[in-house]
Image (tube, grey):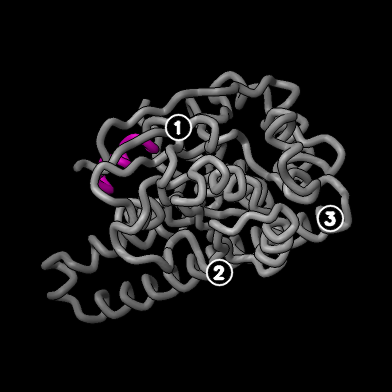
């Protein structure tokens, strides 16, 4: 069964009206044409509001996580503050011991992309949605003084925390930039590796995110991302829940959609490796946290997983 990519309902409806507006029949009936133009405008404006609501929910959730980490309290990506189903136990003791406690407390990921990306000395790395900076700081250590690690985040509180963690760690070959992952403030072909940790799923325009990743990568550059993906069907009740979007669940792509989008952006050597599949009770716990009652039928039709997504920009 074909699984549609998670679009907001307004976008799907608006696209249908675009096709209707452009038909010859509509042009022969100006009053119908004007009516449908007006309706399309309303639908697109509604969708923009939905996207703004999702982005603001994400910003607030991650700002709160940054404040908790700054106070030496554990932050949570996708569960309650004291029991995070997705983000727990991702880094080794040796990795965490190298960094300030707040960096690990603010970790909101679903994997460890720095360990899987096979970074080499002298490489330039970009972390999309860098949060408290743990993956940027680990990357900076891996690429050494001849390399550099950039972190990109839209949340002021996270940027402040990341820069504080950088100072405490004494790392000089890292830089944190403010911006969105849909509009990366770096030049074309300026980095060797793009990493991200459970952030791309939060975007409402994943096609643009992947195009931006492709743009900033040098020829032969690597895309190495930990993210959430679905297998099977995604319940509509979850897909359109703003809180579930901000908690890195509703925005997850089907694993096949991820592959298609990467290919459309221009990537080659695409691979989606499932690193963890969440059990029925874990999914029920996540649903409870976001006020969504997980039905038994959903568990039979679909599955939420964390994955390591690899691709390469052709040389």
User: At which x and y percent is residue 66?
Assistant: 76, 58
| Quadrant where the image shows the C terminus | top left
Residue under the point 32% across and 52% down: 217
Q: Which residues are magenta?
A: 257-266
- In which image quadrant can residue 171 be found? bottom right
- In which image quadrant can residue 299 be found? top right
Is 180 placed left or right of 39 in the picture?
Answer: right
261 part of magenta stretch: yes
| Quadrant where the image shows the N terminus | top left
Q: Which residue is mark 3?
A: 68
Q: Which residue is mark 1?
A: 118
- In which image quadrant can residue 185 be found? bottom left
Q: Nearer the viewer, residue 234 or 176?
A: 176
Look at the picture and state if 33 lies above or below 314. Answer: below
Residue under the point 57% across and 50% down: 136
Residue under the point 27% across and 64% down: 18
Is 171 placed left or right of 315 in the picture?
Answer: right
Q: Which mark is residue 62?
A: none
Is 141 placed left or right of 16 in the picture?
Answer: right
């Amino acid at each position: 069964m074909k699984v549609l990519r998670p679009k907001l309902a307004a976008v799907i409806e608006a696209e249908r009206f675009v096709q209707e507006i452009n038909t010859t029949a509509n042009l022969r009936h100006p009053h119908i044409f004007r009516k449908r133009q007006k309706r399309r405008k309303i639908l697109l404006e509604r969708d923009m509001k939905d996207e703004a609501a999702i982005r603001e929910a994400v910003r607030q959730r991650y700002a709160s996580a940054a404040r908790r980490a700054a106070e030496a309290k554990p932050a949570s990506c996708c569960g309650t503050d004291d029991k995070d189903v997705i983000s727990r136990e991702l880094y080794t003791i040796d990795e965490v011991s190298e960094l300030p406690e707040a960096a690990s407390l603010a970790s909101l990921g679903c994997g460890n992309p720095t360990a899987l990306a096979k970074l080499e000395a002298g490489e330039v790395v970009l972390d999309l949605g860098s949060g408290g900076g743990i993956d940027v700081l680990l990357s900076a250590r891996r690429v050494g003084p001849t390399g550099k690690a950039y972190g990109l985040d839209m949340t002021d509180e996270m940027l402040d925390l990341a820069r504080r963690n950088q100072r405490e760690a004494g790392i000089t070959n890292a830089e944190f930039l403010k911006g969105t992952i849909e509009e990366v403030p770096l030049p074309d072909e300026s980095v060797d590796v793009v990493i991200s940790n459970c952030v791309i799923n939060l975007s409402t325009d994943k096609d643009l995110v992947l195009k931006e990743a492709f743009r900033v990568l040098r020829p032969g550059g690597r895309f190495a991302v930990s993210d959430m993906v679905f297998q099977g069907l995604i319940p509509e009740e979850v897909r359109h829940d703003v809180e579930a979007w901000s908690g890195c669940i509703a925005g997850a792509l089907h694993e096949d959609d991820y592959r298609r989008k990467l290919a459309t952006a221009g990537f080659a050597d695409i691979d989606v490796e499932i690193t963890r599949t969440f059990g029925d009770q874990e999914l029920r716990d996540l649903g409870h946290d976001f006020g969504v009652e997980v039905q038994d039928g959903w568990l039979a039709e679909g599955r939420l997983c964390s994955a390591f997504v690899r691709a390469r920009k052709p040389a």
